[in-house]
Image: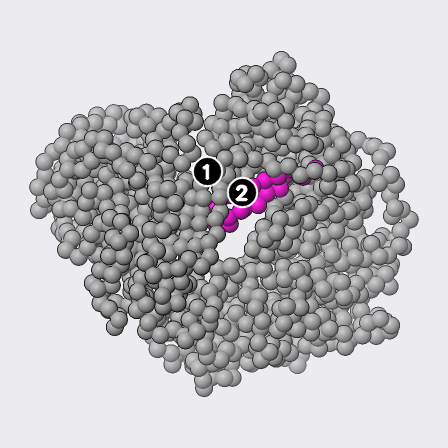
Amino acid sequence: MKRLSALILVGLILALTGCRFEALETTENFSSSMSEIASSSELSAATRAPLVWEPVIEDLMINISDPTNQRLTGRITDRVIIDAELLCSVDPNHPGKASVYSGGESLASESQRNMFTGDDWTLTESEEYPQYFDSQLIGTAYKDRYVDSSGQEYLCQTGPSYSPYSRVYTLRGRMTYSLGQSLSPEYYASTDFAFADEKTAHESAKSFLESAGIAINECYRVRRLSHEELDAELRVYNHSAEAAERFDADVILPGGWTEEEDAYWFTFFWDIGGIPEASQNFSGYLFLEGEFAERFGREEMPINGREIDVIVNAHGVDYVSLTGHFSSPVEMSSGDLMSLDELLVLFSEELYAISREHSFEDIKKSGVGEIVTLDCPEPITVNEVSLVYITLFERFTIEELKLRSFSEGESMLRPYWVIRCSQSQPDEGNPDRSASTRMFFDAITGECVKHSIYGGEQ
Amino acid sequence: MRRKIERILSVWLVVCMILILSSCRGKADQTTTAETNQCNVFQASYIELPTHENRSVRADCVIATEEHIVFLQGWYTDPNDALSYRQELVWTDKVGNVQATHPADGFYGRTTCLFALSDTVFVIGSDEFGYCKAREYGLPGVSGNAIEWNIQNQNVEDAVLVGDTWAFIYAGGRVELFRDGKSIYTRPGHVDDIFSQRLVVQDNKIIWLSTNYKGDTEWVILDPASLSEKIVPVKDNILSVSGAECNSAFGYFYEAYDVVEQYDPETSSVVDFMSVLDTDIPPSRYQFIDDQPYVLDGDHIVYLNNPGTDSSACDPVEVVLLTRLDKNPHEGKTILTLGGHGVSSYNLICRAVYQFNTTHSDTRIRLRDYAYEYPYDSRDSFHQTLATLISDLSSGKGDDIITEGAFFDFSYLGEIGALVDMMPYLEKDPDLSADRWLPSIFELMKSGDSLYRFFPGFMFYGYFGNSTLLTGHERVSAEEMTRLSESLPSETILFPGITSSDLIVASILYDLEYFIDENGEFRISEEQMQALIDYALECGLAELPTYDYSTTDKYVRGKQVLFYSLIANAQMYHGIEQLIPEKTVFVGSPTLSGTAYICVPSTSLAISDATEHPEECWEFIKTMMLPEVQQSIIETGYFPVGASAFESFMEQAMHPEIRTPSEDTGLDLLDKSAVPEDCVERLRGIIDSLNTTGEIDDILSQIITEECTLALAGQKTAAETAKVLSDRVNLYLQSRKR
């Protein structure tokens, strides 16, 4: 094991400019443990320069007025730049209370199957895909085809209960959504379209979802996809897509691309007591250590996020997709949510702890791209701050699991503050090298999942 | 398209890389080679496994019982659902007749672990909770209840049963023995990050081989009776046999390009098991296959050629069964050798050799793979190896036929008398004449009036342009491109990511004749050098960004004038035309005198002047023009050089309904719909205009790069650079003549 250098802790000054700070028990505990760590580290041999970290949070600006574009800016001394997309549906300084829930993982596929069908739709074709495990039926996927009174065809796809999803779309809508996903943000339109302004389109999407019984959070994301850019993107997309993925625009849009295909792409979040559930790109694993690992009895904790995508164009709601939802959550406990101020204090401390453990030299040698460190001369940038519910899957013994049916994976919803940060970490061989990571802070207890490595997008 | 090009290039490049890496394993470490009296030649036949309509069925693994061969194959019932993978066991007799098929249910996801005992087979996998389990099958079907072990969330990579003891190895490197359902012994690997490991039962002992990414290996012989272990040292962390490890529950086998060897870790002895050179193994028609052979028992080997391309095409797996012969049927034949770097992995060469060997009773081709015979691992050792190779060639120690362009400048070797001029053979050949080739391609094969090399297929590459943006600059040249670039709006670029020095290298090397004066010397003037520097600085980048430089979206949106692509068939060219609504122009690679339209030969072949059998060699070269071989080029999705085969390829492009499933396979990653006739006509025009080939002399390239880097950085004037460059290039060209 490499010997760490002597570490001189000049001081931990937590001056929060423009923020009210009330020390939590967790923070006090942390501060005292920091001192212990510092004194023990001073005994270590000196092999690298001492790491000095006096976090002072400055110029913090919170803008939550626009639910589609919340921002958090500021800095922590000159080492951390905060220029973050914020996802927070409550007052970040006074977030109030929240609960922890447990319950079944998802809706059964049968109940999702017809959730979007219109009153004037006629079923024209239906395919069932029963899924077996060990000769036992464990779920059924469906693909249904409908025609509405105007002759427009819709496809409804529903996943089996162990992998729940639900999609309803026209071929045009599916093509628009796929192209929207492939389109670089630089090609998003910046102004509303002629067929409806963004607010009207949002209302249309929201009422469509609500009519299907879906509770969505007030925060959402929107991208404007112009038909000109969709047309160009189709050529880019088809050029690199494999055969089965390509779209034949001549068949899907016999009249070619027109303003009728200008589209708003909304991403909604499921609502849990006024707080959004984490989006799908949070899905993956948390890697746990110490007490946290002990409590859950495991070192890897699968986590899940979900979201709802809707395409609205002049034809109406042209595409909807959603993944399964917590079916019947049961409140387990509740508590006060940590404020943003408190979060940033914990984040600063966590950053220091990580930096002590991982020198820049060690990171370069290891080649790991998931650790940011104050030991690197480049600043750390906070790109994303979210207060969200995350689904964690509890650990069960084999006997317990066998008592349950296959589709009833137990899970727990906990509120987390999640910070995504990144850092340029150039080295001689790779000047564009960078690191990116997410840190998960339990929004009630303040505990940080140490060295969280994320299975999905960093 | 970028992905397609990368995949196509990867066929060429990955093979070279693998061979370079594998060449690091020498055969010098062989300790002993036991002599056996058995014939090491095998006979090939095909086995047809059951198919399932509209399903892409993959053969996952195969094993042999005393009387049967048992395949485990599977497919996804829903391609979007990883959990929908279904598997079945297919039982055949030892000649490949299907005897029974049974579903292999009850496992969570795909399993690839089989173990055979007498005439039963165990399938080992995990249940829905991640616990390891096994099921026993006989010819009539499943027998008994599943066996379960308290092994959770361990990726079991292999399992064997010895008496009442089961042994498992887990991903990452650990072995564990179970008796009566209880763990009785466990042991970690001696090195970290084990990525390859297998278990074999030999003399009631369990032998565990593990290898990590660095090539560190360890053999552990475990005695389940005494729970004792013996570690077999492996010298210098290199296996004492060469080649890639085969799949086998029967022993440890290694397949090199010429032989399959069996290694006995208990005695450190090596036995030749099969002569690859004397066994006619039918090459796969698939471009991407992903399996080593399965050695089933002393007399049977199976190749599972799963198609690695588009699964929606539902191409069936090719199953090749090799059965040991009693006598070598090739004794007494004239042997010709065909040498080249990576030659044993060139599907096209293998097909031609297979075709020749299975149709000629007196002569036989044997491959010599230079990845093994003349290995190199760096630029310096490449040049040393090349010198040795050419020396061997000229002293008669070389091969009868040589192939591949990385080593050989065929035109140069022909000029110095190291190669046979095949033109006289062609002229007097009753079966073949020059008009059987595409005219432009035949011209590119020739060196003056001589024919020193032959290639059976080709691609071409270069820049394609948006005609609207190129208006007024139709005469493409480096200087014209400079003017065009200067006139572009600031948000529009001319080239996709290319460095300034690469622009200069391409301009000179693809137009080398332009700079050769009447005395045969290379001369570049100050004005020419200045024009190239201006072109490079205006149109190129100082250095390439390290991130993926995807430029398709800029070209599509008119923010980039030129788009680089490699074209192997009409579908790829049509894909380029479809990127923009405007007319597409093939720009090639700009040079000072105009532009280079670059042909990329598939695999070049030449006859060594030292051969004692030039007539027989020509007979083999001719094989490349046989309809069967030209057809095989079509089936891999490349342009054939034969005029007739090319016409057929174009007809298929315009009328996809006439394509056979095999012909479809080569286009699996492309849009297979009909290519319009006018598009095919434009493509023909481009192929007619190809005026150079894409081989680049590495040393010349290096010289130009070195000199131009200084000029581009402003450290040397154009005049200084022109003089030094002329001198250095001439010196090199003179040295080659010596």
Residue type at numbered disc 2: Tyr
Residue B149 visible from this viewpoint: yes
Q: Position of residue A77 (x, y in %)?
A: 17, 46
**Image check: B530 left or right of A33?**
right
**Image check: B2 left or right of B159?**
left
The residue under the point 59% across, 43% down is: B74
The 10 Å Cα crowd at callout 2, few under 14, some 14 to 19, many 20 or more, is some
Residue sitting nearer the eye, B528 or B591: B591
| Residue at the limit of the structure toward the top, as seen here | B226
Q: Which residue is mark 1?
A: A138
Does the magenta-highlighted stretch encompass residue B81? Answer: yes
Chain part drawn in magenta:
B71-91
Residue type at numbered disc 1: Ile
Q: Position of residue A95 (x, y in %)?
A: 14, 42
Asked if the residues shown at circle 2 and circle 1 are in contact, with their CB atoms under 8 angstroms apart, the answer is no
Q: Position of residue A138 (x, y in %)?
A: 46, 38
Secondary structure mostly seen in magenta is: strand
The residue under the point 87% across, 48% down is: B330
